[in-house]
Image: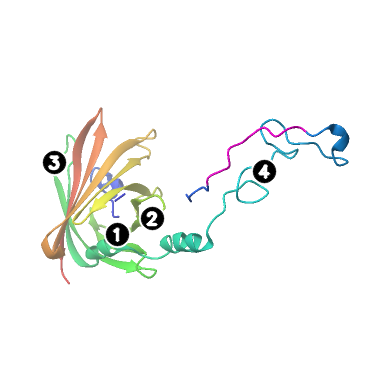
Amino acid sequence: MKATTLPIALALAFTAGYATPRAVPNEAPPAAPKSQDPPGQNPPDSKGQDPKGQNPNTTGGATGSPTVDPAMARARQMALTMPGRQHLQLGNQTGHWAVNIAVMRPGMPRQVTTASAVIRQILGGRFLWEQLNGQLGGKDYQARAISGFDPFQQTHFSIWMDNLSLIPHISSGDAKPGQMDLKGVRRDWEVPNGKPYRTETRIGEQARTMVRRVYEEEDGRETLVMEMTYKRNK
């Protein structure tokens, strides 16, 4: 398969197609004498093109566009609108969670805090919505995330927003039962040119626990900068 990522800003806060019918091979038809041409029209050229650039040898109508089966078109459209197997798997994350957050910044001691999270499916099971609330340095911390599966691109995606920044964190990637790996690029005042990061999510047995880890990449090497451990309340 080709969601829910984590706020890099949280770590910083601690430091302050369709099938195409087969075309008839183009053959050069014998040019009719100009005296026999209908007024105002020219015969096809040696490539079988008519005066308007249309190829009369291509099936699908005067424009040369492939003929699309209406039933197939409707089926493909429905596949892009109705939740599927991947959306059901995302449903394992729904519930009320107690969250322990650990932040590891280079050259800084490990910082730990707690939060609570509610995760639910919205819009008929099409997307996953997370609300996380906690304390950071004695101040309220609020985060919201929306994630899902894009059947057209065949990829999972996540958008994370919080009250520490005006910049959303957008990532995408692959998932399979019990785990998910998404990649994105963090851009803010600290790294205006961007720094790649990866979020991995691992869901425990019977979805009673969930661990999310954020790795930042620099010079081709990944460093763990945050770990969030979720324990289900209900």
Image marks 3 and 4: residues in contact by CB distance under 8 Å: no
- The residue type indicated by label 1 comes to Gln
Tell me which label, 4 or 2, sits earlier in the chain: 4
The disc label shown at residue 151, or none:
2
Residue 210 horizontal/vertical position (percent): 16, 58
Tell me which label, 3 or 2, sits earlier in the chain: 3
Image marks 2 and 1: residues in contact by CB distance under 8 Å: yes
Q: Nearer the viewer, mark 3 or mark 4?
A: 4
Distance, label 1 to label 3, CA atoms, is 38 Å
Q: Nearer the viewer, mark 1 or mark 3?
A: 1
Residue on which the image places disc 3: 109
Tell me which label, 1 or 3, sits earlier in the chain: 1
- The residue type indicated by label 3 comes to Pro
Figure quadrant of residue 75: bottom left
For the image, the number of numbered tags is 4
**Frontmost residue, 213 versus 41:** 41
